[in-house]
Image (cartoon, grey):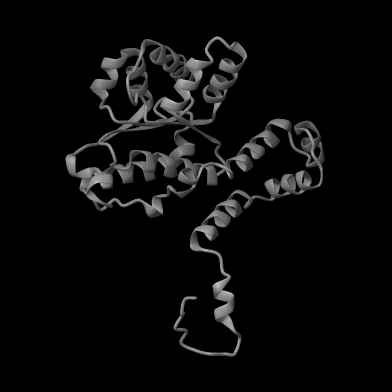
Amino acid sequence: MPHYNLPHNHGQNIERVLDNMPSAEGFQDISFLFQQLGDSTRLRILWLLCHCEECVCNIAAAVDMSAPAVSHHLRILKKSGISEEFRNKRFSNFNYTIENQVYEAYKEAYIYAKNFKSLEKERCNSIMFMGQVGAGKSHLSLAIANELMEEGVGVVYMSYREVITRLKQNIMDEVYYHRVMGKYKNARVLLIDDLFKGKVTESDINIMFELLNFRYFNKLPVIVSCEMDVDRILSVDEAIGSRLVEMCKCVEVKGKKLNYRMYGK
């Protein structure tokens, strides 16, 4: 049992209370959930779902909203169950003191998140972090996503290699393929983590072109992390690379000592 060295004793047996207090990580999880519920409409929807299982149309009628609006709030609520990694990547816990270019990348990410709603309908409405392994590209991408979600903007996370592998394994199943592709094509914001990680095949390129071409022509934003620089992306596929360059603010972070996994945080 820890000794707390409390400065005063008020006879309240506070040490027993402290022994039963959840960890700081436990409170972080609760805090994230409260952030998702910090909207009166989402609270009304959650209350209704706690008492009965209903379809979107009935929920919409009950709370006097359109079905698409209810669906949007349900997606935000669903995000509260997303992975631990996603939840914990914030601007507040990103170490930008490693080197000046890391700070510049942090600054670009922060500015993008804060200005997103004014950029969303523009041609250049996306951001791509490129270069050094372990320099925080994924952290900054996820920090933007969490910031946007707190503002009510739906973000879908796509782990490039994992999703590409699943799609290729099920490419003959048209229903599955179109359902999964539709999820990523139509997301309000799509976060593609580790684009072109590993060996890139022709089928990988075809799938990514289908996805990014759709988002390009519909001006749907992407947040991308990639170990390649612009020239290497263009050499993999010029059509994909040229669309990303036109869509994205390109932020490159490179340098041997920037890999925090090897050299420390």
Residue 165 visible in the snapshot: yes
Q: Quadrant of residue 56?
A: top right
Residue 218 visible in the snapshot: no
Foreground: 5 or 235? 5
Q: Position of residue 33 (x, y in %)?
A: 59, 51
**For the point 37% across and 30% down, which residue is it?**
194
Q: Is residue 5 left or right of residue 56?
A: left
The answer to whether residue 253 is above or below residue 16 is above
**For the point 81% across and 34% down, which residue is it?**
58
Q: Position of residue 89 (x, y in %)?
A: 43, 47
Q: Position of residue 76 (x, y in %)?
A: 61, 40
Q: Is residue 48 left or right of residue 131?
A: right
**For the point 50% across and 42% down, which residue is it?**
148
Q: Residue furthest left?
A: 256
Foreground: 28 or 90? 28
Q: Is residue 87 left or right of residue 231?
A: right
Q: Quadrant of residue 124?
A: top left
**For the point 29% across and 16% down, which residue is it?**
236
Q: Position of residue 125 (x, y in %)?
A: 42, 30
Foreground: 135 or 123? 135
Number of numbered discs overlaid on the protein picture: 0
